[in-house]
Amino acid sequence: MFENILEKQNKKVMLLGNEAIVRGALEAGVRFVATYPGTPASEIGNSFYLIQRSHQKIKNLYFEFSVNEKVAIEAGAGASFSGLRTLVAMKNFGLNVASDFLLPLVYTGVKAGMVILVADDPNCWSSAQSEENTRAFAQLAHIPILEPSTPQECKDFTKFAFEMSEKFKIPVMVRETTRVAHQSAPVKLSKINIPATKGKFVKDTHQFVTMPPRVLEMHKELLEKLEKIRQFCEKSKLNLVNGSPSSDKSGIITSGASYLYVMEALGKLSIDLPVFKLGFFYPLPQNKLNNFIKNLDKVLIVEELEPCLEKEVNILAKDINPKLKVFGKDLLPEVGELKPEIVLRAIAKFTGKLTVGGSTSDSYKKPSISISRRPQLCPGCPYWLVFGAVKKAVNEKKVIFGGGIGCYMLAGLPPHNIQDYLYCMGSSIGLAHGIKKSSNQKLITFIGDSSFYHAGIPALINTVFNQSNPLVIIMNNDITAMTGHQPHPGVEDGAPIVKIEDLVKACGVKNLKIIDPVNQKEFIKTVKDFVNKKEVSVIIARRPCVFVKKH
Amino acid sequence: MNKDFNMVIVGTGGQGVITLLQILAEAALIEGYDVKTSELHGLSQRGGSVEVHLRFGKKVFSPLVARANADLILGLEMQECLKSCYYAGKQTKFLINKFFIPILGQKSITEKAIVKEIQRFTKNIIVIPAADICEKELGKNVVAGVYLLSYASRNKIIPLKPSSILKAIEQAVAKKYLELNKKAFKLAKTLNYEMGL
C-alpha cells in the first residue's frame, strides 16, 4: 500500500514490489529520480510523484516525469556524474528508447550510484507490442542485471544495486517482471537516509568523452571491470543454494518469480533437491554454477520467455560436466508467463513424479458458457466523441487507420474497430508517412498527447520535410491516462506549459485545427476536409480525460 | 490453520477489487501470517475483467493461486465467476455478489445458468444480493465487497477474525470512504444466510 512506503524503520508493512523499489531507493539515499510511465513499472514514478506532492515531501530529493525514457536516463546520468545517487525507472520498451544512451553509459561508467529499474511483462498483461525480454541487454550492453523475486528482495536488491554501482562505477539494472512488480508481501523497513551534499560536476574528459581511440580503451576497461564484478558476484549472497542433494543427482536453477513457483511446487510434491536461486542474471557466478552442476546428472532451468539461462548452463556444462542433461524449454513454454501449475507439472515430469489426475494433471474443462469482457473507454471519455466523428466523416472501408500506445488503442476493439496497425510510441505517424509515400489511399492516424511529446515530433517533422499527407489526430486529453494519470509537458502542473499547437506549427504543418470533439459538426467537417489535403494535416482533439481534475 | 489459504477475487474495473485485496492482506498480516497478493494494473482496469489473488499461511512463496487450488473465490460480478472456475476444485467455496454488469456485445447470462456451470466444479456456492442490500441500506452498491468480506469472516468462510478485518479496513480505506465501509462491514452482522443453494 502506498501509505506504507514512508512508514518508520523496523516496521513490517505490506508493499507492492514497485513500492518496495521506491523504499529501497530512499533507504539507499537516492537524490534524483527520473522516469517515463509504463506499466508494470508505473507505480514507481507515481509513488515518488505523490510523496513529493504530499505533506511528507522528502528534502533533497528531486523527482521528474521525463519526456521519454532516453531523456530520463540521460538526466539521471547527469545527476550521477554530479555526485548524486540516481534511480531511473521504465518498462521494457522504454529501455529500447533509452538504449542509444545506455550502451556508451556502460562504457564510461558513472560516479554516484545509478540504478536502472526495468520491468518486463511476460504475457503482455499491460503491454501491446511484444513480450520483450530485457535479459537480452546483458549481452548487448554489458550491464549488470539483478533479478529480485519478492517485494523484500525488491527493496534489498535496490539498495545493493546502489552500493554495487558506486563500488564499480557502473550503472546497475534491477529487472522485474509483472508478478514481482505487482506482487505485494510484508517488507521489513530500514531507515530512510537522504544525504544533503550538494551536487558538483567535475570535468573529466577521460571518463565522459567517448571518441575513438579512447572509446576502444573504454571497451577494454569495461571487460576488465566485468571480470572483477563477476568475481564479486561469485561471493554474493544474492546467489544462493537451497535444499539438499537428491539421490537421483538432480537440481534446479532459477530466479525471479520462477523461483517462487519452484519452491511452491517442491513443497506440494514433497521433493527435496538443491535449488540454485540466482540474484544476478549478469554477470553469472560461473564458478558457483560449475560447482553446482558438476556433480549432477540432470538439471532443470526454470525461466520465463527465452532460454537465456539454459544456453549459459549448456555452455558451462560442456567443460565441467559434458554428460549433464539440461532440461528447460522442452518442459516449459517459451511464450507467455509461467504459473505455479505449469512449473509443478514440469518438475513432476523432470523428477518422474508425474501422476495421472491429481495435482499434476493439466486437464481443465472450461465452463460451457464463456465470457469476454474486453477493456473499454470509460463512460464520458472524450475519445468516444473522436472515434464517433471520424467514423461519420469517412468511409471506414476506404481509409487506413493508424493506432498508437495509450487508451486510444481501444480504437481496435468493438464498437470502434478503426485500427489497422499498432506498434510503439510515436510510430503511428512514422508508419503513416511510409504508407502515404507508397500508396494513394487515405490515411488517418491517432497519437496521444503524451506519445506526441515522447516520440511523435520527429515523425511529424519527417512528414513535412519529406512531403507526405496523412491526417494526424492528436488525442489531447491533458494527461498520460492509461498508465495512471501522470502529467506531461502540456499539463498545468506548476511548470511552464509546452503547447502542442506551438510544436505542430513549428514543425511546419500548415493545416492545423484545435477542436473540442464535443463540437461534432465541426470535427466531422474538418476530418472530411483534412483527409483530402495535399500536405500533412493535424487536428488537435482537445478535451480532458474524465479523471483530470479541473484547476 | 494448518495449510495455506488460497483466495481469488474477480470482478470488473471500478468495483474496488484492489482495495478489498489490500484489506485482506493487511488483516492476514495483523494475524501474523505470511501473505502474498498478486494484482494487475494498466489497461485491464478500464472496465475489463479484473482478477486478483491472495495467499496466506505459515510460509507463502507463489503470489498466484494454482489451478483448481482456491479455497475461496469471491465474485463481485456473477458472469466473471465463470472465468474463475479455472481456480475451482471440489474444496472451493464460491461467495458471489448477485450483481450483473452487462458485457458489450454479449447477451446477459442468467444466474441459474451460471450457478449450474459452477456446480460442475464445486457444490459450495453462496449467492448473496449484497449489491442490492448495500444500495438499499447505504445508498451505494460499491461496498458490496466489504459487506461480503464481513459475511465471510463471521461465517468462518475466511479464516480471519472480523476484528482483524475491521482494523485492516481502517488502515487500507481512504478517510473519506471509511465510514461507509465500516457501515457495510457492520451491516452483514445481522445477516443470516443458509449455506448452499
Image (cartoon, coloured by chain):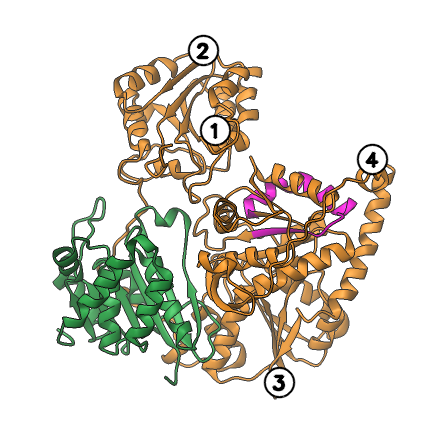
Chain colours: A orange, B green
Horizontal side of residue A153 vs B179, given as left or right? right
Whether residue A108 is in magenta: the answer is yes
Given residues A366 and A509, the one toward you in this image is A509
Give the position of the N terminus of chain B as an image quadrant: bottom left
Callout 2 and callout 3 share a chain: yes
The answer to which of marks 3 and 1 sits earlier in the sequence is: 3
Q: Residue at x 66, y 39 (%)?
A: A74
x and y, in percent, of residue B181 in the image: 26, 60
- Seen as rendered, the residue at the extreme bottom is A247
- Disc 3 crowd rating (10 Å Cα; few below 14, some 14-19, many 20+) is few
Q: Which residue is mark 4?
A: A211
Nearer to us of marks 4 and 3 is 4
Q: Amino acid at mark 4?
A: Met
Subunit ID for the residue under disc 2: A
Question: Residue under circle 3?
Answer: A244
What is the spatial separation of the Cα atoms under label 3 and label 1, in whole angstroms?
58 Å
Vertical order, B93 against A393 (above or below): below
Please name which of the two marks, 3 or 1, marks the residue nearer to the observer: 1
Residue range corresponding to the magenta coloring:
A90-118
Alpha-carbon span between mark 4 and mark 3: 52 Å
Q: How many numbered discs sit on the rendered protein?
A: 4
Q: What is the quadrant of residue B137 in the picture?
A: bottom left
Residue bearing the label numbered 2: A534
Amino acid type indicated by mark 3: Ser
Q: Mark 1, residues whose alpha carbon is within 10 Å: few (<14), some, or many (≥20)? A: some
Q: Which residue is mark 1?
A: A490
Q: Is residue B63 above or below residue A406?
A: below
Circle 3 chain: A
